[in-house]
Image (cartoon, grey):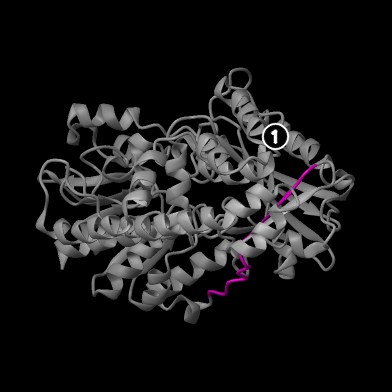
Amino acid sequence: MKADVVVIGGGPNGLAAAALVAKAGLKPIVLERREILGGAAVTEEFHPGFRASTVAHTAGPLRPKLVAALDLHRHGLDWTRQEPRVFAPLPDGRGLSLFGDPVRSAAEIGRFSPKDAARYPEFHASLGRLSAVLSRLLELTPPSVERLDLHDLFPLAGFGWALRRLGRADGQNLLRWGPMAVADFAQEWFETPLVAAVIAARGIRGMMAGPRSAGTTANLLLEAAAGDGNGAGSTVLVKGGLGALTNALASAARGFGAVIRTGAGVERLLQRNGRVAGVVLAGGEEIEARAVAAAVDPQRTLLQLLDPIALDPEDAQRARNFRAAGMASKVNLALSDLPRFTAAKEGDAVLHGRIHIGPEIDALERAFDDAKYGGISKRPWLDITIPTLTDPSLAPAGQHVMSVYVQYTPYRLRTGAWPERAGEVADAVLATLEEYAPGLRRLVVSRQVLTPWHLETIYGTTGGHPSHGEPSLDQLFAARPFLGFGRYRTPVPGLYLCSAGTHPGGGVTGGPGANAAREILRELS
């Protein structure tokens, strides 16, 4: 069997890349190891009648240009998009809501601190200006570290001009804030512990780092750039769960002529005459191709699928040193009724977006303290959605699904091993939530726990890292996954990388797949 491009992995990035190259007239084949498409963006039944976006629970959001280029709404994509909103309760019954509207957010903050309320619109505007510029960076192919390609010159010049137009104050702030610990950044703006914690949490998401770790503000700025640049962060839910999003991408890809196969695990890359020329499946079937685009993580691609002799020893060592040990788990709860948060005095509407559990920066740092020494955080930082409030089809009538992102639960444990200790994660989540929503334990019909071990074993992500690699300053842009491999191409002709382990990184955005597709088309068209 032959194709123009073989795409390994049927997650959002693989499907986006396949759809775009198919739209351009090439013939791609997508090979997904599991029997269900979606990768980490999948909707699955975890208890009879209860379905959830089992790994990721919000869209990144998906890149708007990608949605338009593939006409995904015509293929069934339906947002249950909420106004950007995060609800942060406290155990004492107080709560804070932040919105896309800075005036409305400031009014909420004013109940805690008039000084912080006065500063919030300025913070919102500053973050918006920076994210508008940085969002251009997310769509660029990182430049070569050895020589600047002419194709890179004009986009980089455009980014440089936009950066210059920021003005001196914002430009200096960008250079100063990027390397900062996000705790320092948040506390530079706000004195209220809860407000600072909600802001700081965006900088540590997906990182084996605490809010006092250097460089975590860069993660916040890039997350804001990928979203809409507001202080609250985006909340984009998909009707039918994230599996409906990947189904729309798959439908678009098939509509342009792509072939998609599930239950088709790739055993190794086929190499001939010094280049990658296709793949060999687990059963021995060979598929020849002009190029292979790997939407699986870089370490799996370079250290397991590729013949070791194809890589320079120095590159092989850098691949082994790429930091990709996960720190997050996912707990999905089937609930007999809607939990009652003591701080939700305005009613259920406050629960429609994301729910932040982390009362202050010190609490977030203490949660990290457990993990950095190989322990499961006893009071983890939680990011929660209750998708059934906006999409009742995910559970039986009157019942609910609670989707809980849990940080910190390290891939490498000091004592014991996964998955035997998975139950401790759910116990820590429920014990923490009881302080905010008393009686929640009694509502639990069933619980599903996915630790980094499960993310590696079931979903095929080396190290169980949700972003296929740590989004730290030394593993971003041209250095993602590492220098020399940051342009989606690899030194091995015919092999491309297009997973979240490449620029612009994780989140359900489709960005790495879209960017890689552009580079594949540049060489094959």
Residue at the extreme bottom: 74
Q: Position of residue 426 (x, y in %)?
A: 73, 38
Residue 46 visible in the current orientation = no
Q: Which residue is mark 1?
A: 425
Crowding at label 1, few (<14), some or many (≥20) Cα neighbours within 10 Å?
many
Inspect the magenta stretch and tell me whether residue 79 lies in it: yes
243 vs 268, left or right, is right
Quick one: SS at disc 1?
A: helix
Q: Position of residue 307 (x, y in %)?
A: 24, 36
Task: Write the residue at 17% across / 31% down.
Answer: 312
Rendered-image quadrant of the C terminus? bottom left
176 vs 126, left or right, is left
Task: Write the residue at 25% across / 74% down.
Answer: 24
Residue 301 sits in which quadrant? top left
Rendered-image quadrant of the N terminus? bottom left
Q: Magenta region: which residues? A: 77-90
Residue 261 sits in which quadrant? bottom left
